Amino acid sequence: MVTRLNPYLTFNGEARQAMEFYQEVFGGTLDLNSYGAFGQADAPNADKIMHGMLQTPSGFTLMGADNPPGMESAQGSPFSVSLSGDDEAELRGYWEKLSEGGSVAVPLEKQMWGDVFGMCTDRFGVPWMVDISGSEG
């Protein structure tokens, strides 16, 4: 039996675009299920995402959906999605794609503790932290 901890992101109508963007960033297999596919074909939100799941070649899973009707998403929630490891090329590639069109709070550079670290918010308002351990950069 395997138990996993997976980030689950909530969007205000942009889940399809965001999850497709994350697939471009990380690669992998993306499954998107709309509200319409689950019996709400005539609802105003029929084309919105009820559940999306991206499974990447690196072995992580990212899930996301649009808010159900009547619920609002609170921007600025106290969370960040963290990517860390020692594959500098892979992590720098993710950083470049995630930060493009977003904002950088901490540039991806060598920090006092020795790792290369950066913080950005992508164009969908999701905050990311990237830490490259043991990097010479």
Image: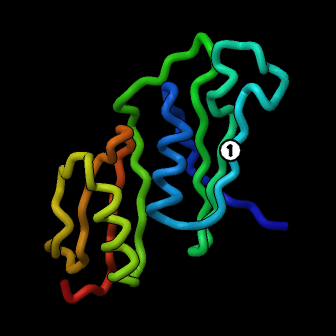
Q: Is residue 51 left or right of residue 115?
A: right
Q: Would you place residue 63 above or below residue 129 in this image? A: above
Seen in the picture, residue 26 relative to 125 is either above or below; the reply is below
Instruction: Look at 72% across and 39% down and name the residue there.
Output: 33
Q: Secondary structure at mark 1?
A: strand
Q: Which image quarter: residue 15?
A: top right
State how the image is colored: rainbow
**Left or right placement of residue 56 versus residue 41 in this view:** left
Query: How many callouts does the rendering have?
Result: 1
- Hey, which quadrant is residue 76 in on the image? top left
Q: Is residue 101 above or below residue 28?
A: above
Residue 57: x and y in percent read 60, 74
In the rendering, at what x and y percent does residue 79 appear? 41, 43
Task: Tell me the residue at 82%/29% (across/down).
Answer: 38
Q: Nearer the viewer, residue 44 or 92?
A: 44
Question: Which residue occupies the foreground of this view, 80 or 89?
Answer: 89
Return the residue nearer the eye: 130 or 112. Answer: 130
Q: Residue at image x 21%, y 89%?
A: 136
| Quarter placement of the C terminus | bottom left
Measuring 59% from the left and 10% from the top, which residue is drawn there? 70
* Three-letter code, disc 1: Leu
Quarter of the image with the N terminus is bottom right
Badge 1 density bin: few <14, some 14–19, many ≥20, Cα 10 Å: some
Image location of residue 56, percent across then percent down: 60, 67
From the image, tell me which residue sits under label 1: 32
Asked if residue 70 lies left or right of residue 75, the reply is right
Q: Is residue 100 left or right of residue 14?
A: left
